[in-house]
Amino acid sequence: MQITHSAARPFSVVVDQREIRDIGTRFTVRKSNSDVSVAVMEGAVIIDGLRKQDTNTMSPLTLATNERVVFDRNGIVQETSQLIDSRRALLWTGGVLETRGELLPEVIAELNRYTIKPIKIDDRRLETSTVQVGGALHLTDIHSALLHLQKVAPIRVTETESAYILNYLSKGSSDTDRMVFAGEPIREIVMELNRAATKQILIDDPEQRFSNAQFGGTFDRQDVRGLLRGLELVFPVRVRETADAFILSYRPEPLPSDLRVPKAK
C-alpha cells in the first residue's frame, strides 16, 4: 500500500483486532494462520495493542522506514523490529517469491498461501528438513515453482486431481545421470563432484564461513555450473571460473538473483 497521509482522514488497517495506522507511508501487511507481518518501505506506521513477550503491558509500536515486525493473534511480538530489504519485501505483490536460503518447509508453507490445490508433504523427513532453498519462484504458476524446487531440493513432486504430493528423494534414488544431495556439507559435496569432474573445484574458505553449510538438491552430473549457481543463490559464496578450475570463496554481500557463473575467457 502507498498512502498519502491526511490528518483529517487517517488511513488504518485492522488485522486480528490490531489497528495499523499510517503516518504517510508505503507498507505491507501479511497475515498467516498464526501471525501477522508488517513491513514499512517508506514513512512510518503505528500499530496499536501490541506487547513484548516479557511484559503484560499493551502499547502502540511505531515502525519507521525499512523496519518490520511480526506478532501473533494475541498481539505478542514474535520478532522485534528489523531492517529489511524493501525491494524483496514487495516482490510478493508482483507474484514473485524470492528465496535466499530459507528452509524447505518454510518455502512450501509460503507457496501454499497462493494455491487452491494444496501442497501436501507425504514424508516426515521433509517436515523437519534443514535443506535451504535459493532462487525466484513464480507465485502465479505453482506447478512451475514446484518443478523448480524439485531441481534444487531432494523432493519428488506428484500432481493429483486434488493436491500436489511431495515425497523425499533419498540419495539411493540417484542414477548415472543425476546426483541427489540431502543436506550434506558443501565441503563433502565438492569432494564428490571432484571425483568425476573434468575441471577441479577448489574451496578458498580458511575461516570456514560457508564450507560446512548444508546443501540439498537434485542435479545433473553434467551441469556443474548449475549446481554452483545454486550455491551462490543460497549461500554467501562467490564462484570464479579459471581455465583450470572453479574457485569458491566467501562473498560478504548478496549477488543479484539473475547471476550466472562467469565463463572462462
Image: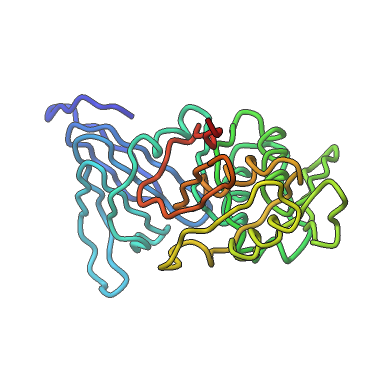
Extreme-top residue of the structure: 4
Taking depth in this image into account, of 207 and 47 the one nearest to the observer is: 207
Name the image quarter holding residue 122: bottom right
How many marks the image carries: the answer is 0
Q: Position of 84 compared to 131: left or right?
A: left
Taking depth in this image into account, of 193 and 82 the one nearest to the observer is: 193
Residue drawn at x 83%, y 44% as measured from the top left: 158
Extreme-left residue of the structure: 7
Taking depth in this image into account, of 135 and 115 the one nearest to the observer is: 135
Report the colour scheme: rainbow
Q: Position of 27 compared to 91: left or right?
A: left
Name the image quarter holding residue 173: bottom right
Decide: is 47 above or below 125. Answer: above
Q: Position of residue 119 (x, y in %)?
A: 71, 46
Extreme-bottom residue of the structure: 54
Q: Position of 254 compared to 160: left or right?
A: left
Decide: is 158 above or below 131. Answer: above
Taking depth in this image into account, of 71 and 147 the one nearest to the observer is: 147
Residue drawn at x 33%, y 38% as measured from the top left: 86
Residue drawn at x 71%, y 43% as measured from the top left: 151
Quarter containing the N terminus: top left
Q: Position of residue 150 (x, y in %)?
A: 73, 45
Name the image quarter holding residue 105: bottom right
Q: Position of residue 149 (x, y in %)?
A: 67, 44
Q: Position of residue 252 (x, y in %)?
A: 36, 52
Q: Position of 204 compared to 27: left or right?
A: right
Residue drawn at x 39%, y 39% as measured from the top left: 89
